[in-house]
Image: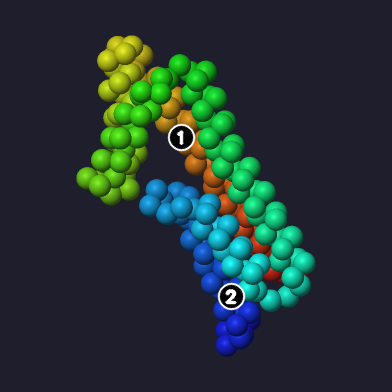
Amino acid sequence: MDLTDTEGLIALLAGVLIATGVVGVMLPVLPGLLLTWSGVLLWALLGGGSAGVRWLVLVIATLIAGAGMVIKFLWPGKRLKSTGVPTSALMAGGVLGLIGFFVVPVVGLVLGFLLGIWLVELNRVGHERAWPSTRAAFAAVGLSLLVEFAAALGIAVAWVFGLIIA
């Protein structure tokens, strides 16, 4: 790829956005799926090669991103409801996770989330049953991350194929 031409620079910038988005799924600071999709959008609007292929890849990326966002919230939420973890525990986990993120960057988010859920569950169901509820909530959040990561990877793979074909 000749980096002196505009099409090459657009492809490179799109690739950096997509790679940053895939990594960003695991970092709570970056909107991973949005960055990944944005890279494909940039390439579809300004990239080189066949416009039909670029737009088809954008449509595929949009469908993958949309499905990923919906599944990311529905599937783990359904699992949490089946375990009986109340919304108040998740809210407390979210608040303490946010506080923890600023106190202990990145790791504090997870620690605060777990602590918040555990404290609410400790108060609600007692010491013996608090940890299983906390573990179930943590597993649901992990599932949500995996769904979003799979969607970001799917978008990246679609873009690479489109880059090759276009």
Rendering coords of residue 13 (x, y %): 54, 72
Rendering coords of residue 143 (x, y %): 52, 35
Pair 1/2: label in front: 2
Rendering coords of residue 49 (x, y %): 73, 75
Query: Decide: marks 1, 2 in contact (CB < 8 A)?
Result: no
* Residue 102 marker: none
Where 152 sits versus 42, above or below? above
Locate the N terminus by quadrant.
bottom right
Q: How many marks?
A: 2
Q: Amino acid at mark 2?
A: Ile
Q: Residue at x 52, y 67 (%)?
A: 16
* Residue 10 marker: 2
Q: Residue at x 59, y 43 (%)?
A: 68
Locate the C terminus by quadrant.
bottom right
Q: Residue at x 43, y 27 (%)?
A: 137
Q: Is residue 113 visible?
A: no
Q: Nearer the viewer, residue 10 or 122?
A: 10
* Residue 141 marker: 1
Q: Quadrant of residue 55?
A: bottom right
**Position of 159 compared to 112: left or right?**
right
Q: Residue at x 48, y 61 (%)?
A: 20
Where 105 sits versus 46, above or below? above
Q: Quadrant of residue 132?
A: top left
Q: Residues within 10 Å of mark 1 (few under 14, many from 20)?
A: some
Q: Is residue 136 visible?
A: yes
Q: Amino acid at mark 1?
A: Val
Where 124 sits versus 104, above or below? above
Q: Which secondary structure lies at badge 2?
A: helix
**Position of 44 compared to 101: left or right?**
right
